[in-house]
Image (cartoon, rainbow, N blue to C red):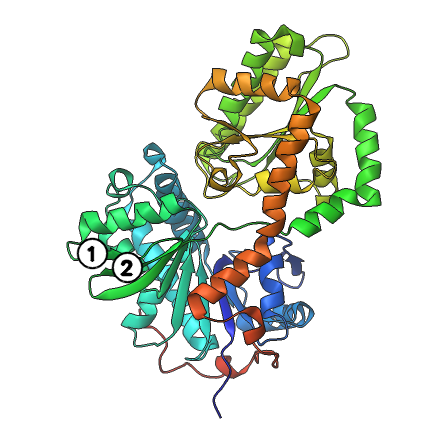
Amino acid sequence: MTEKARLVIVSNRLPVRIDGSAGKWKVTHSSGGLVSALTPVLRDRGGIWIGWTGTAEMVDMKTLREILGPASKRAGYRVFPVRLSKEDVNSFYYGFSNEVVWPLFHDLQTHCKFEPDYWKAYRRVNRNFARAVARYTRAEDFVWVHDYQMIPVSRILKESGIQRSCAFFLHIPFPPPDIFLKLPWRDDLLRDLLEYGFVGFQTTRDRRNFTDCLRALFPDVRISGRGPIVSVSAEGRRLKAAAMPISIDYRSFRDAARSAKATTLLQELRKQIPRENIAIGVDRLDYTKGIPQRLRAFGEALGKYPDLREKITFIQIVVPSREEVSAYLQLRDEIEKLVSSINGEFSSPGWVPIHYMYKSLPREELVAYYRLADMALVTPLKDGMNLVAKEYCACQVEDDGVLILSEFAGSASQMHRGAILVNPYDIEGIADAIHQAATMPEDRKKARMRRLRAGIRSQNVFWWVDNYLRASTGKALVDFPVTEMAPVFHALKRRSPETPKD
């Protein structure tokens, strides 16, 4: 009897994280958009998620089984761990992933550190992930690999003689040839991507950059087809390349914004910040998000438009990230100095222009802040998509907010008709956009926001998953049948003969 195909997700992180120390381990569950979107696909269908536990402590496999077994049962799908040492975390994660690929793919190559040891660690860790795929999956399973940390997985499997149907989705931008060609290992990384049967990108521009890079390096490239999905032939390989923008769980954010708890928090916030206009920025601490430029633009708006003074407050929420990296510590210091400088110049009795928070907020509190804000400043220097823009709009349940959006965010390709688009490097341009949003008539605000929310509602994250599965496998969610959860012990009893070698 033929085994039914199961969906296998491979990502740098599991949807759960292990924290603590020996004998005191704690499992924390993620509630991110990708997890909420993929859980219905994996749950009760024998689904599997393979990824890192989030800890550099080398927890033995027996303990991991004891910790993750109950977590899998609660989730309804099996989570299988890949262990990373401290050296792996430093060289693979902080090193190649975040000091090479991340800045390069965001057009910030001056931040890159092209260290050969980083590249070696990247391949080594990806071999560990490929081993996990070989160990925990079957030949008939569909393996969906996510993001820039995991690009080599499919090629490593094939070079080890392991047959799996693999697709890939890149959540960050893909750079044009003049940027990508600076990568010393450019040929290898493109050949890695060619080993997938299906490769998805956030935007048509990203997909075009990918095919342009192929043309620049491989003379035999052929591209055919029109629309969001094209066929690619290169280096003796054939694959489909697609532009398929990710989204959010619209209903979840809308309902959270309407909830009694969010409404109560909203009323309290309005008492604390009684201003005619409130602007908000919500970002992870990262140099790609354009936070310093945005702060300078807000200061420029206060200087250029005196009618805004004492009538507008900007709330900037920065979520801590990669605090071990010196560039991020320097960025935090720059942000805090800018906040202090602008507040020092423009504050008056009873009014502080910028309210700055360096912390992560619980979801119910975040949606209350979204509802509070009359405008959102989403101005990254470069972003694959930027889901904050969509989250803000989903929470505008009264249709009266204004979205100021960077033209270099992937979301601009879908949201340009309802948002005010800005160049994130144009300080005066953003200042003008802030004044435009603050003085926009109510009927125009509502018309713009209704258009934005309708688009997110119809093309939500579940629409994205279903379309991706249909395009890459020819199957919809209902075609992944209900079955028993994947066993936890069978693959661990012996080393698979097809496990990739070092």
Residue at 53% across, 23% down: 294
How far across and down, in percent of the image, does residue 437 sit? 62, 22
Q: CA distance from mark 2 to mark 1?
A: 7 Å
Viewer-proximal residue, 95 or 297?
Answer: 297
Instruction: Judge left or right: residue 54 versus residue 161.
Output: right
Crowd tier of the residue under label 2, counting other residues whose Cα lies within 10 Å: few below 14, some 14–19, many 20 or above: many
Instruction: Provide the residue designation for mark 1.
Output: 221
Report the residue at 68% width, 20% height from top: 313
Pointers 2 and 1 in contact (CB under 8 A)? yes
Quick one: 140 or 460, which is closer to the camera?
460
In the image, residue 187 lies at what x, y percent?
22, 53
Q: Secondary structure at mark 1?
A: loop
Q: Amino acid at mark 2?
A: Val
Which residue is under mark 2?
232
- For the residue labelled by badge 2, is the local secondary structure a helix, a strand or a loop? strand
Which numbered marker is on residue 119?
none
